Amino acid sequence: MITLTHVTKRFPGGHEALRDVSFSVKSGELVTVVGRSGAGKTTLLKLMSAIELPSTGNVVVSGQNTKALRPAAVPYLRRKFGMVFQDYKLLFDRNALDNVLLPLHIVGLDGRDAVRRGRAALDKVGLLSREKAMPVTLSGGEQQRLCIARAVVNRPAVLLADEPTGNLDEAYAREIVELFRSFHQVGTTVVISTHDRAVQERLAGRTLTLVDGALTDSAHG
């Protein structure tokens, strides 16, 4: 489903975030990307979802080379992905339900069907009773679950999560891990980056290890 072939990502100033990385993710697979801060995990997820393009090498998603896409085609490719960011990226002037509805409005879905799907996504993450709550009134764990609801409301084929437990205590982290496992169990392809080996062990699946931008290991849990 997603294949990276000899991918290097170089940023202005010469910093190489990734070096000669090659691997594939199959449809329905659960993959954990582990590595220290600065190892290249965030850059890797951005390359997979065409937020960034490789400096050299190729990223192919469902048969489409991201470097060959016309700019107008990129948003359509990104609809395959649900993204969960470490810093949440919530809209703090909108309530929980309105935050979840945003991706649906972007693709032109409004009205009762959008609200029904938004509430179903909130229900999946245990936040239906908080649909009118403003994000600032939610705990860290609840804010992260809200991000996950927003990421899955469009029923993406692939769920990408960048350090989704990084700001959470152990109890909340376990809840978030179980949420990702539940989405994987119903067929969603899930790729999660983490520096926390405990998270990787709970997720099981396949592990990719990044060290200073280089892929050093690919193993099944």
Image: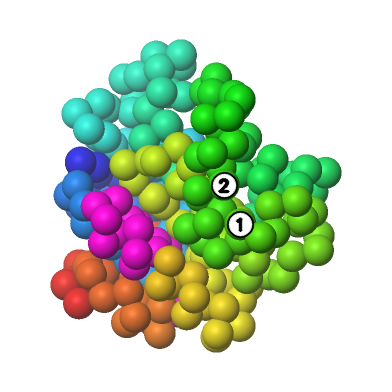
Q: Is residue 88 above or below residue 57?
A: below
The crowding category of the residue bearing disc 1, from other C-alpha atoms within 10 Å (few below 14, some 14 to 19, many at least 20), is some
Tell me where residue 74 appears, x and y as whole percent. Answer: 43, 23
Q: What residue is shown at x 56% (from left), y 53% (from top)?
A: 122
Tell me where residue 28 appears, x and y as whole percent. Answer: 21, 52
Check residue 195 for magenta coloring: yes
Q: Which residue is mark 2?
A: 119
Q: Is residue 173 left or right of residue 185?
A: right
Q: What are the residue bounds of the magenta stretch? A: 180-197
Q: What residue is shown at x 42% (from left), y 31% (from top)?
A: 79
Q: Disc 1 versus disc 2: distance between alpha carbons?
A: 6 Å
Check residue 13 for magenta coloring: no
Residue closer to the observer: 183 or 168 = 183
Q: Is residue 24 above or below residue 37?
A: above
Q: Quadrant of the N terminus?
A: top left
Contact flag, marks 1 and 2 (Cβ < 8 Å): yes
Going by the numbered disc 2, the residue's amino acid type is Arg
Q: Is residue 171 left or right of residue 211?
A: right
Going by the numbered disc 1, the residue's amino acid type is Leu
Dot 2: element: helix
The label number, if any, that marks residue 128 in the structure image = 1
The label number, if any, that marks residue 218 in the structure image = none
What is the quadrant of residue 217 in the picture?
bottom left
Q: Is residue 12 above or below residue 167?
A: above
Q: Quadrant of the C terminus?
A: bottom left
Tell me where residue 40 appears, x and y as whole percent. Answer: 44, 58
- Asked whether residue 52 is in view, the answer is no
Dot 1: element: helix
Residue closer to the observer: 122 or 148 = 122
Q: Is residue 97 left or right of residue 147?
A: right
Of callouts 1 and 2, the N-terminal one: 2
Residue closer to the observer: 108 or 201 = 108
